[in-house]
Amino acid sequence: MPKQGAFTFVLHSHLPYCRKAGRWPHGEEWLHEAASETYIPLLNALTDLINDGVTPRLTIGITPILTEQLADPTILHNFEEYLDEKIVAAQADIDRLADVQAVWEAAQRAETEPEPEPESTPLLSSEELESLITKNDALLSSTAGDSPAPLHAGLLSATTVASADVAEIDEVVDADVEAELDIEPEPEEPAALEQPDPHKAYLAQWYRDWYSMIKRSFIERYNRDIVGAFRQLQDAGYIEIITCGATHGYLPLVSRDSTIYAQIAVAVQSYERHYGRKPKAIWLPECAYRPAYYPEDRSETERKPGVEEFLEAQGIECFFVETTTIEGGAPLDKAEGKILGPYGDTLRKYVVPVTREVPPTGNSTLQPYLVGLSDKVAAIGRHHKTGLQVWSAEWGYPGDANYREFHRKDSESGMQYWRITGPKVDLGFKDYYHPDWINDKIHAHADHFTNLVHQVISEYRGQTGRYGLISSNYDTELFGHWWFEGVDWMREVLRRLAANPDIDLTTASEYIANNPPRESLNLPESSWGSNGTHQTWLNPETEWMWPIIHAAEKRMEGLVAAYPQTDGDLAEALAQTARELLLLQSSDWPFLVTTGQAQDYATKRFNEHVDRFSQLADAIEANDLGLMRELTASFNDLDNPFPTIDYHVFAAREGLVA
């Protein structure tokens, strides 16, 4: 019996470039957390399914800049150290809590044991009494020199008392008396004992074992090669790895077509080097799309090409867009967030006019569409209804009370020992996490999602008679890192869908190849950012960045024009300059500034790459070979992605896509 429709998870894996740029709270530890909590658990889930005889299929994007970092020896060495640190931290909690338990148990035993009988004062014989009197007389005599001691010997005179601090004298007298009579001082009030916490101790052991398992998987199962492990799954036909802009540059807001070309061309080159083939699909950074338009200044070109034209020139046949880009209407879940303040719009004269408010179109995200004038590049829209089950904080599975709480961490070890408990429960009142409670929840949520997918596919087939595709799109790090149980949930969804007689598990490019799009759409300029616009990346907090980016684009084009053919130190310096330009173009820097998640860090990182670019450009323009050589070596030690980059990718090409 033919299947009614198809399904694919589309996962977008991305982190900013942070190699040798800090560890915690901002920097390389972002990579370590994602690798331990998301990437290796996902590899384990897929491998376990295969070992169980299940054929998992999904689409996963790993951005070029993330791929470069996950393949970097320094990152991998530091990642292993990070795992050891987590294991040691959990063990320290185990030891500390064991000590608390031991002290508490000892105190409890002491309270229940009978107190020993006090020792009786021994009775002295007449000889012992005579000896004691003789010793006492000798002690009194020693206080008066050669004269016999008076009866008041040893007491302080009235004159001494009058001139001394009475409180101090009392302390001295009391201490002397206690010492002479061997009297024990009054004991201090004992501090309250820390109560034992057996469930927290159990969780510490659970985390120690969990991180130990992740380390074993990294070393023994994947031979310390995360990128290679994903490549093997693709080579075996289980997954499709898609690409992205080289450094996640926000394409609609750059000023030069050379930048769009470079971001995509370098991405393809990096993909071929790591995965041994060309990519067929791409996740545009932030799902940000720019259609073709007529520029106000037409001195260089009459027409700026749409993003799909650059993709077609690189052999890429598919990309993904936000739901409303296909269906119209108001922004939904991922794109409907509100950010206060006035934000500038990017107003353009489009080749195909679009309205600011997109009315419902009647189109469906269950079908791919050819884009613009291209007959080779298709867009697939994110399916909203299934996405809501994971993205929504109010309705989604990750908000279940029994799942692990992300935001509360132990003050000593940093371990996350608590569960969500409830939607409005303050962090200080969260209950402890219970790993043994979650299995039933995972299976129940996997059943619900599978039934939802089946319902949507069946209804669409019944209404249209067409074989549709649900593309359920998410940030990969949402699973495992933010939603700790999410990878296990995904594993169980894939297990169920693989066995479903009505649904094909597929990948994006496979679906397009087997079901070529029938219709074309002229897509509006859009993103999956707040309100579906550019305002997350262009607003009063970040607008200062864009003139700097635009000036650097133009300057790089000038350097390429000035040195069309070169080699040696100058070629290396130009390549490093191109590297720094790609890094300063990352959409992560304005995003982190806008959201406030790491505003100072992002500003610093952006300015560092701008400064390195400028220093190299100055040295090249001054033809200072010595300084060029010095700066290239210094900056390449810090910023070394894309080792085979050709600086000619930034040659001026306004209006051209190749």
Image: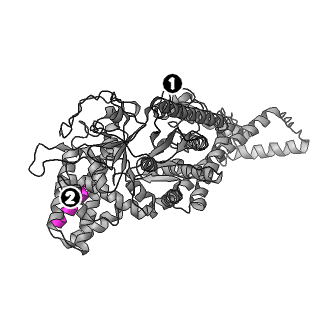
Hey, which quadrant is residue 148 in on the image? Answer: top right
At numbered mark 1, what does the secondary structure look like: helix, strand or loop?
A: loop
Q: Position of residue 387 (x, y in %)?
A: 46, 35
Q: Quadrant of the C terminus?
A: bottom left
**Relative horizontal placement of residue 104, taking residue 383 as reference (left or right):** right
Is 621 magenta? The answer is yes
Near-viewer residue (321 or 460): 460
**Relative horizontal placement of residue 287, taking residue 385 as reference (left or right):** left
Instruction: Look at the picture and state if 246 lies above or below 108.
Output: below
At numbered mark 2, what does the secondary structure look like: helix, strand or loop?
A: helix
Q: Which residues are magenta?
A: 610-622
| Residue designated by label 1 | 424
Q: Position of residue 392 (x, y in %)?
A: 46, 31
Identify the residue at image location x=25%, y=36%: 539
Instruction: Look at the picture and state if 194 lies above or below 132.
Output: above
Give the amino acid at mark 2. Answer: Ser
| Residue designated by label 2 | 614
Q: Position of residue 656 (x, y in %)?
A: 20, 55
Identify the residue at image location x=86%, y=42%: 129
Q: Main secondary structure of the magenta part?
A: helix
Tell me which label, 2 or 1, sits earlier in the chain: 1
Can residue 331 be seen here? The reply is yes
